[in-house]
Amino acid sequence: MKLGGSVVGSWKTSEDWAKLLTSTGFAAIPCPVNSNTDQALAKEVIAATREAGVVIAEVGVWKNVLSPDTNEQKDALHYAKAQLALAEEYGIPCCVNIAGAPGARWDGAYKANYTQETYELIINTVRDIIDSVKPKTAFYTLEPMPWMLPDGPDEYLQMIADINRPQFAVHMDFVNMINSPRRFLYAHEFIEECLQKLGKHIKSTHLKDSLMKPDFTAVIHETAPGLGQLDFAQVLDSINRHLPHDAPVLLEHMNTFEEYDQAFRHMRAIAKAAGIPHA
């Protein structure tokens, strides 16, 4: 696997970017530019990334394509298509968003997230994005979330069948789906299930830890690897067995270069000790 994460730090030129990227030691990263970036700069930065031997694992959308605000929904849909087109243009295999929510908060927990009407809207929206761009090598994916679909491996498989587009695939974030005490307590069995059922469809994976506090009724937190309760020797072994040897696995949701560096070194040490091939 190719371990990496988000690159934290300021840069203005492709030379600045190359120095910052090299300092991380990452083998894989999210795309450092987007569809609004100056095209000449975007080409230079992507070229510099590849010259450094680093894989660009995914292009993020992170906008609410299901927003009840018509203008916000329209802008989000336009951006999702532009980001998928960017992934296609530069040979980046994964364009990722969450399904979205029919409420004011783009990633909010709403009862309507689970209605048949919303499900059909998700299916039709994903089809529209893919059919509009017509990618040949890039895949549109949905990151699982704790309170919106897809929130489990079987739900994701059903969504793949219902969307019925070859360029729809899977973005794996198993911690986002550890959304109940039972899944937390059987986390490693659940992660194995996710990878076993969805492995052949996975284009990119997020890596983080899960922590359940002994509070009532149930409090489950995402945290940086090493600060939670997952056994990452088991987690990395599952990833290694079910995904291609060059699969990108990205740390996320930390705030500083130092936090990413600490988590990255921690994961590399675990992989080395467990004899799990990684870059």
Image (tube, helix red, strand yellow):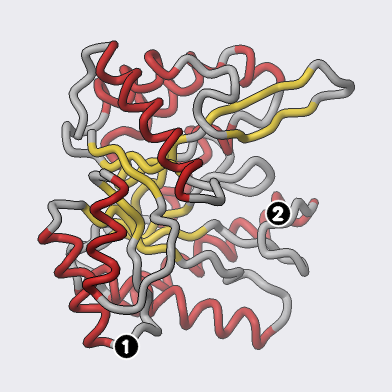
Q: Quadrant of residue 72?
A: bottom right
Q: Is residue 81 above or below residue 94?
A: below
The percent position of residue 243, horizontal first and vertical second, equals 25, 31
Circle on res. 38: 1
Which amino acid does the dot numbered 1 rest on? Asp
Asked whether, in this view, residue 24 is left or right of residue 118, the answer is left
Q: Quadrant of residue 65?
A: bottom right
Q: Quadrant of residue 266?
A: top left
Which amino acid does the dot numbered 2 rest on? Asn
User: For the point 78% across and 54% down, which residue is it?
Assistant: 110
Q: Is residue 2 above or below residue 110?
A: above
How crowded pointer 2 is (Cα within 10 Å; few <14, some 14-19, many 20+) is rated as: many
Report the mark closest to the observer, 1 or 2.
1
The front one of 107 and 150 is 107
The front one of 4 and 160 is 4
Helix, strand or loop at label 2? It is: helix
Outermost residue toward the right in this view: 216
User: For the point 23% across and 53% down, which residue is it?
Assistant: 22
Asked whether, in this view, residue 147 is left or right of residue 50, the answer is right
User: For the point 39% across and 55% down, which residue is it?
Assistant: 7
The front one of 80 and 236 is 236
Q: Which residue is mark 2?
A: 113
